[in-house]
Amino acid sequence: MSIPLEKDKQLILFDGVCNLCNTSVQYVIKHDHQDVFRFTALQSEVGQEILAQFKIDTSKTDSILLYSKTDGISYKSTAALKIASKLGFPRNLIATFLIVPVFIRNWVYDYIAQNRYKWYGKKEECMIPTPELKSKFL
């Protein structure tokens, strides 16, 4: 199965049961004025296919992922900062943190990721998009 993503779009893969992740997806949707992003939960069929295709071990990578047909896959802080770079001014300014070494950015990212359920909670099921948003989800 090929990934059903238009060439000029980028796909954000997120933890569908994480409250922080779901809130972040809602934020991106609200500020994605260029209609760059599509979304899928890591737990979805498309998410599972991408994990398998790129041989991503979810027990070792607790991360948001950003996929595009041209650039492949980005992980953790790099994915988050690349997403922010597409959200317009002033949110795109956060992408300047890409100059910080990856090991430092990912240390901060991992600390938040490891504590996200404790701090923000967890849902029993993945978010179901509203009919208006359904076209943004794979």
Image (cartoon, rainbow, N blue to C red):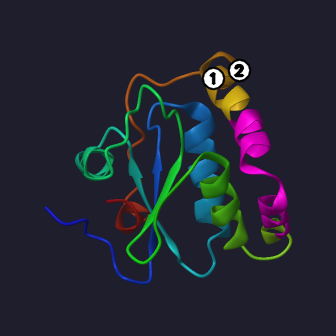
Is 117 within the magenta?
no
Q: Which residue is pictured at 53% across the width and 31% down the height?
A: 18
Q: Residues within 10 Å of mark 2 (few under 14, many from 20)?
A: few
Q: Can you give x and y, in whole percent of width and height, for residue 104 in the image?
A: 79, 41
The residue that mark 1 highlights is 114
User: Secondary structure beneath disc 1?
Assistant: helix
Q: Can you give x and y, in whole percent of width and height, for residue 42 in the image?
A: 38, 42
User: Secondary structure beneath disc 2?
Assistant: helix
Relative vertical location of residue 44 with respect to residue 60 in this rendering, above or below? below
Q: Decide which of 51, 92 is in the foreground and name it.
A: 51
Q: Dividing the image into 4 quarters, which one contains the N terminus?
A: bottom left
Is 96 within the magenta?
yes
Q: Which residue is pictured at 60% across the width and 56% down the height?
A: 79
Q: Amino acid at mark 1?
A: Gln
Q: Can you give x and y, in whole percent of width and height, for residue 117 in the image?
A: 60, 21
Q: Earlier in the sequence, mark 1 or mark 2?
A: 1
Q: Amino acid at mark 2?
A: Trp
Q: Dividing the image into 4 quarters, which one contains the C terminus?
A: bottom left
Q: What is the distance, in whole Å, between disc 1 and disc 2 at their CAs?
A: 10 Å
Q: Which residue is pictured at 34% across the width and 79% down the height?
A: 6
Q: Is residue 70 left or right of residue 63?
A: left
Quadrant assignment, res 44:
top left
Relative vertical location of residue 90 with respect to residue 115 in this rendering, above or below? below
The residue that mark 2 highlights is 119
Point out the stretch of residues depicted in magenta: 93-109
Main SS category, magenta section: helix
Relative vertical location of residue 79 with respect to residue 92 in this rendering, above or below? above
Q: Decide which of 74, 39 is in the foreground and name it.
A: 74
Q: Decide which of 105, 81 is in the foreground and name it.
A: 105
Q: Which residue is pictured at 46% across the width and 31% down the height?
A: 17
